[in-house]
Image (cartoon, rainbow, N blue to C red):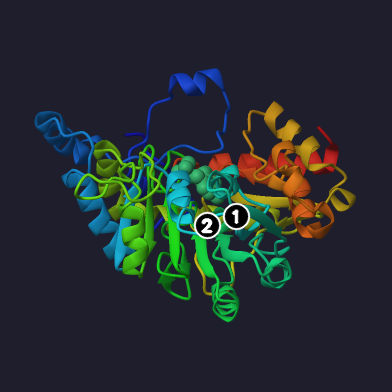
Amino acid sequence: MAVLRNSFVTSLPQNGGMHVPERSAHDVERPYRVPLSRPALPPIEEVIDDVRRILGSGRLTNFGPFVREFERNASKFLSVPYAVSVSNATTGLCLLLNTLPRGSEVVLPSFTFLATVQAILWNALVPRFADIDLETFCICPESVKERITRNTSAIVAVNVFGTPCPVEELEEISRARNLLLFFDSAHALGSQHRKKYLGSFGDAEVFSVSATKVLAGCEGGVVTTSREETCQAIVNRRNYGFSQDHDCMNMGLNGKMTEFSAVMCNRSLPHLNCQIQHRNELAQGYKNQLRTVPGISFQCVPEGDVSTYKDFTILIDPSLSGISRDGLAAALGRRGIEVGTYFSPPIHRLKYFQPNSDDMALPNTNLVASRILSLPIHSQLSDGELQFVASSIKEILLHGD
Ligand SMILES: Cc1ncc(COP(=O)(O)O)c(C=O)c1O
């Protein structure tokens, strides 16, 4: 295991106790000096016995012992009564939204990943895009209110990059208007709102454990809820819609998590808080370096909340920095620094979704999407690499590329 030297993480075990993968064929294809993200994986000695048990038993899927263990672990970790594993968060969202009346409207942000809106359209529901807050990049409650009609059945809020949404305000709107409230928490396993892990807010939340997430289970997801009937609705749909007596009473999908993914999650979960603390320290390191640079600002995490920092993003104001977001991204790429531009363009500007959109109603979304840039953040990012990214940004802004 490579040794991570990072002065931001002096209180943590080396690399949060996680395994550092060797450079892979994937890295050779995209030879970045500083990659945007790399999965944090459990040490091989922590998973090998479980892998042997899976191979020995021949039980690879179909809700085996490791998947059941993951559901118990997730429920306990997040302090939520029900945690239902699924094959990925997209499927989890599809199954959850399948409980809504066909043809009804769902309010969601346009500043999100494709999966959020696709789950709506796969269920023949109508997306209504609300604008976001300029500081947190999460859905704006005032805009949500404006998008609700008599035909609205639910709100899907997204905890963007791990930053918690304004939970109480959204819960109040959903209560007052008699709507269901779901959270797309794909980025946010381990985020906290007012000292409570996300997972039990609203009517249900959906987490992803795909390879780019802080808890990386290869592919997978988990739907959490405090409501027994919501838990049952997912259980009734995630196995092709089969009921226990082999009848079928619901639309279904293949939503099964594999035993291998569950092992990855089970063995990574004890390291999760360490990983999140490390990422928060890296984020603070970037902020310290870039705070005084004209034209750069950061996503705000509300006071008292904790973000997973699944992504660390900055905004570039070209009128102050003298360079566009795309100009800076290209210049960093030439220096071997991989960056991301999530979520740009936002959903309502993608061709397939334009008929459902009202561009004029989303000024904050348009602004943030045009300025956003994600910088490298992962458990193996060294102090030196972080300094290199920050000083490259300063140099490009000061002297040009
Ligand atoms: C906001 C958001 N929702 C949903 C998903 C879908 O997650 P999955 O890849 O597990 O299907 C993603 C994927 O990254 C996402 O970013």
Residue 55 visible? The answer is yes
Residue 103, disc: 1
Of callouts 1 and 2, the N-terminal one: 1
The relative height of residue 317 versus residue 254 in the rendered view (above or below) is below
Residue at horizontal 48 percent and vertical 45 percent from the top: 90
Residue type, numbered disc 2: Gly
From the viewer's side, name the closer residue of 345 and 352. Answer: 352
Query: Looking at the figure, which quarter contains the C terminus?
Result: top right
User: Residue 143, percent across and down?
Assistant: 72, 68
Badge number at residue 257: none
Q: Residue at x 43, y 25 (%)?
A: 23
230 or 143, nearer to the observer = 230
Q: Amino acid at mark 1?
A: Gly
Could you say where residue 200 lies in the image, as x and y percent from the top left? 40, 69
290 with respect to 387 (left or right): right
Q: Which residue is mark 2?
A: 162
